[in-house]
Amino acid sequence: MQTPYGHLTYCTNIHPGEKWEDHFAQLRQHIPAIKQRLSPDKPFGIGLRLANTASLELAREEQLNAFRKWLQQENCYVFTMNGFPYGGFHDTVVKDQVHTPDWTQADRVAYTIRLFRILAALLPEGMEGGISTSPLSYKFWCNRCEEEQNSFTESATLNMLLVLEQLVRIRRSGGPLLHLDVEPEPDGLLENTGEYISWYFNDLLPAGIPFIKEKFDVTDEAAADIIKSHIQLCYDVCHFALVYEKPAQVLETLHSRGLKVGKIQISAALRADMTTRREAVVNAFRQFNEPVYLHQVIARKASGELIHYPDLPEALADAANPQVTEWRSHFHVPVFINRFDVLQSTQEDIIEVLALQRSQPFTQHLEAETYTWEVLPPALKEEIGLSVSRELEWIAAQLQ
């Protein structure tokens, strides 16, 4: 839905259905009721997530036309998509396979270009569109040596330029401005502001500027501007909170380097003070130890040094570590709740990000992304439409 500070929606990755028929059935079931609660008389935006199989099916003209017709009937529109999870995201073990295929593989390129063509066909006239994507690869797949990691980074970057070329061609042929929004996350090849900026200036621009110059006969400066317009950052609030980065500092750093934010993914992580009631805190974290998604934990010592655990079980095994003063876990919890008994959330980071957006908007796209409703502890589960509505109402209130 339209707010004075951008388009606000939720990501439909919360709805199961890897085939388009199944996912479309979920949209028809839930979207009208959510829209009626939140935006009964005005258009309602959708943050669409398509698995690869669904994207192949929706790319067919007859399916695309049917979806367009439904959007028009329901007074809805699509302005952003989540292109991070390629395959199954429900009723299966996802874990590190959420990165498969990574950006070193041709399947990731084909999938992303297909998503952009779908988005370009659905996007309302005069509106820009963005698709969030993985942070190149998963660190543990390429961390055996610096040379191997550099090879992964180079291959992934060159593949991303193939998508960039298509976005420039769409724009130059009279189509919309489309941007690929790279989403850093813990244990991704890019997981924080420093790594994102290092990649952008040491890998992406050096490879991209001559590539764009050759393809479109422009100057170095124009090529750099083109890249910065079409490859932006997806600011997942949970992910940046996990690495203990302050929102104002992140945004100031990006701004100082001329880099743009394509989308805010509004999400909260679990956190806890480990200096008091440690046994109760650890037992509370055990309730969130479920087998479907990765729940990376980043612990902070009194010295400020960080300890990275690839998943919650590894952190639980080291729960007695006396040097640790705080845990933060990659478990997207409802954004409108800031306490879970002895645990807290990183909701304060969301409040700060939205305050910064309110004072000086830095993106047009805002998307709630609490995808864990199915695996939350029973006490936190509610009917999905009500849960989504409560999240978006809470976010809208912060923007006011």
Image (cartoon, helix red, strand yellow):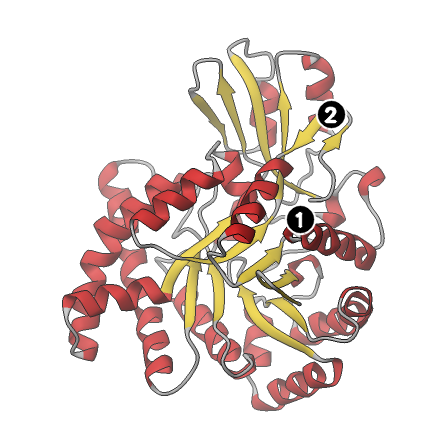
Circle number at residue 284? 2
**Quadrant housing residue 3:** bottom right
Residue 111 horizontal/vertical position (percent) = 46, 70
Query: Mark 2 or mark 1, which has the lower sequence index?
Result: 2
From the viewer's perspective, is 202 left or right of 347? left
Task: Classify 11 as above or below 238.
Answer: below
Residue 292 horizontal/vertical position (percent) = 65, 45
The residue under label 1 is which amino acid type?
Gln
The residue under label 2 is which amino acid type?
Ala
Element marked by disc 1: helix
Q: Is residue 182 visible?
A: yes
Q: Which residue is mark 1?
A: 398
Query: Which of these two is toward me, 45 or 87?
Result: 45
Residue for point 66% across, 67% down:
1
Task: Classify 29 as above or below 295.
Answer: below
In this figure, what is the number of numbered marks? 2
Query: Which of these two is toward me, 282 or 350?
Result: 350
Residue for point 84% across, 49% down:
382
Q: CA distance from mark 2 to mark 1?
A: 28 Å
From the viewer's perspective, is 382 left or right of 272? right
Element marked by disc 2: helix
Task: Classify 228 as above or below 344.
Answer: below
Task: Classify 400 as above or below 50.
Answer: above
From the viewer's perspective, is 232 left or right of 216? right
